[in-house]
Image (cartoon, grey):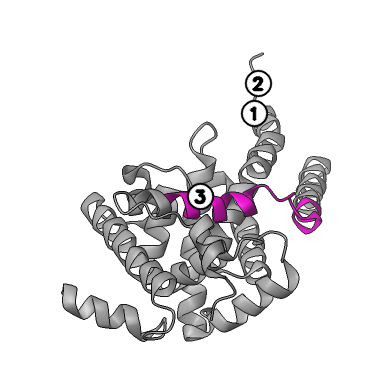
């Protein structure tokens, strides 16, 4: 299954037969960075706040005893 | 400034959280590259945060938080995979998900091809090439994260590169020939 025309493929994938590893490395990093650059979803910020709050409460309760 | 043990601990709490936050973008990218699906990757990241938080006494401030979290995440992934069997692997599902819900992030069809190729690698090779090729870890650090020998990591990375080359060449230039699943197997048979 491919959505690309021959012209597009030629444009995106110039044939660097001498350095296929370079192409693979570039694509791998592009994929990785595309996720890394997303904003941290709120669910994780909320989760960390909750974990922190629970811990503070516990340590306060511990001191009160 | 003498600082009892208690004040020391208190001072460390916020920075543990801060360091964890700082490592989250790359942790998500690692999870996403390993699994290929946003929803499952983020569930795994959430499990990892919970585990790490519970184990924070084991973490030594000043050491590599990112490597520590990555280790927890990959151990958690493999323990979940063992529990669920192969259910975690779902290449058709992730492809649909990523096209339907995240068209902008993987706008390049070229990258979609790469994603599918990455998904065809055995898990140990996939994590090795991600750690070394994208996460920025040295071979030594990657070996430590995966709990294996340096030579093992090196050979996994080499095999991953070779395999990706094979797959991408086949899907790119030979679209009307053997399908993407059988072709790499055929070409591999000639290599080995």
> Which of the labelled discs sits on residue B8, or is there none?
1
- Mark 1 burial class by Cα count in 10 Å: few <14, some 14-19, many 20+: few
Residue A58 % position (x, y): 78, 49
In-front residue for pair B116/B32: B116
Query: Disc 2 vs disc 1: Cβ atoms closer than 8 Å?
Result: yes
Question: In 3D space, how far apart are the residues under numbered discs 2 and 1 (Cα atoms)?
Answer: 6 Å
Mark 2 vs mark 1: which is more N-terminal?
A: 2
A33 displayed left or right of B155: right
Judge whether B185 appears above or below B134 on screen: below
> Which of the labelled discs sits on residue B48, or is there none?
none
Instruction: Kindly state the secondary structure of the residue where label 2 is placed.
Output: loop
Question: In 3D space, how far apart are the residues under numbered discs 3 and 1 (Cα atoms)?
Answer: 39 Å
Numbered disc in front, either 3 or 2: 3
> Image quarter for residue B162?
bottom left
User: Chain ID for label 1?
Assistant: B
Numbered disc in front, either 3 or 1: 3
To which residue does mark 2 refer? B3
The magenta segment: A25-47
To which residue does mark 3 refer? A29
Which part of the image, by quadrant, shows the C terminus of chain A?
A: top right
The residue positioned 36% from the left and 86% from the top of the image is: B178
């Amino acid at each position: 299954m491919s959505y690309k025309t021959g012209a597009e493929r030629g444009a995106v994938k110039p044939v660097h037969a001498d350095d296929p590893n370079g192409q693979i490395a570039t694509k791998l990093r592009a994929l990785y960075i595309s996720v890394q650059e997303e904003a941290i979803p709120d669910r994780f910020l909320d989760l960390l706040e909750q974990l922190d709050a629970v811990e503070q409460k516990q340590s306060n309760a511990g001191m009160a005893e | 400034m003498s600082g009892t043990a208690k004040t020391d601990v208190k001072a460390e709490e916020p920075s543990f959280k801060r360091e964890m936050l700082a490592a989250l973008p790359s942790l998500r990218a690692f999870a996403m590259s390993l699994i290929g699906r946003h929803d499952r990757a983020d569930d795994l990241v959430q499990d990892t945060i919970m585990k790490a938080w519970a184990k924070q006494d084991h973490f030594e401030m000043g050491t590599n938080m990112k490597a520590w979290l990555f280790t927890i995440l990959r151990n958690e992934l493999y323990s979940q995979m063992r529990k669920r069997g192969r259910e975690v692997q779902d290449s058709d599902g992730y492809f649909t998900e990523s096209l339907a819900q995240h068209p902008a992030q993987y706008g390049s069809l070229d990258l979609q091809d790469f994603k599918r190729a990455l998904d065809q690698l055995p898990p140990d090779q996939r994590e090795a090439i991600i750690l070394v090729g994208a996460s920025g870890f040295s071979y030594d650090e990657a070996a430590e994260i995966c709990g294996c020998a340096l030579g093992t990591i090196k050979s996994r990375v080499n095999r991953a590169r070779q395999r990706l080359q094979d797959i991408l060449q086949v899907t790119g230039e030979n679209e009307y020939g053997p399908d993407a699943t059988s072709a790499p197997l055929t070409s591999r048979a000639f290599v080995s």
